[in-house]
Image (tube, rainbow, N blue to C red):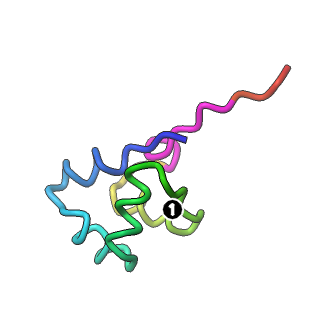
C-alpha cells in the first residue's frame, strides 16, 4: 500500500512530531507509516484523513486488484 501522509503533512508545514501530537500517537508511528513500515489501524487512518480534509482513498492508495 502506498500513502501520501508525508505529502499532506509537509503541505501543512508540520513536523512528524506535530502530526503525532495532533493524532495522539508517537512520532515513531508517523515515521513508520510514512516509510511504509507500518499500515495504520482503520481508526488512525480515518483520523489522519479527517485531519487533512481528504478521503482515506486519497491518503492511502491500494494497488490491489481482484482476480477475474
The C terminus: image quadrant? top right
Residue ranking furthest to the top: 68
Q: What residue is shown at x 41% (from left), y 61% (from top)?
A: 48
Which span of residues is magenta-colored? 56-64
Q: What residue is shown at x 67% (from left), y 32% (from top)?
A: 64
Residue ranking furthest to the right: 68
The N terminus: image quadrant? top right
Residue 27 position (above or below residue 15): below
Q: Nearer the viewer, residue 4 or 36?
A: 36
**Image location of residue 44, percent across then percent down:** 50, 67
Query: Which residue lies under the disc numbered 1?
Result: 46
Q: Is residue 20 on the magenta stretch?
A: no
Q: Nearer the viewer, residue 29 or 42?
A: 29
**Image location of residue 19, percent across then percent down:** 28, 67
Q: Mark 1 falls on what kind of element?
A: helix
**Image location of residue 21, percent across then percent down:** 29, 77
Residue 36 position (above or below residue 66): below
**Image location of residue 16, percent across then percent down:** 25, 64
For label 1, the crowd category at 10 Å Cα-Cα, with few meaning under 14, some 14 to 19 and many 20 or more, is: some
Q: What residue is shown at x 35% (from left), y 60% (from top)?
A: 31
Residue 22 position (above or below residue 61): below
Amino acid at each position: 500500500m502506498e500513502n501520501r501522509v508525508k505529502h499532506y503533512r509537509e503541505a501543512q508545514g508540520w513536523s512528524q512530531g506535530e502530526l503525532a501530537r495532533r493524532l495522539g500517537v508517537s512520532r515513531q508511528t508517523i515515521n513508520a507509516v510514512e516509510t511504509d513500515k507500518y499500515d495504520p489501524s482503520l481508526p488512525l487512518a480515518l483520523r489522519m484523513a479527517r485531519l487533512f480534509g481528504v478521503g482515506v482513498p486519497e491518503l492511502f492508495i491500494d494497488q490491489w486488484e481482484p482476480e477475474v
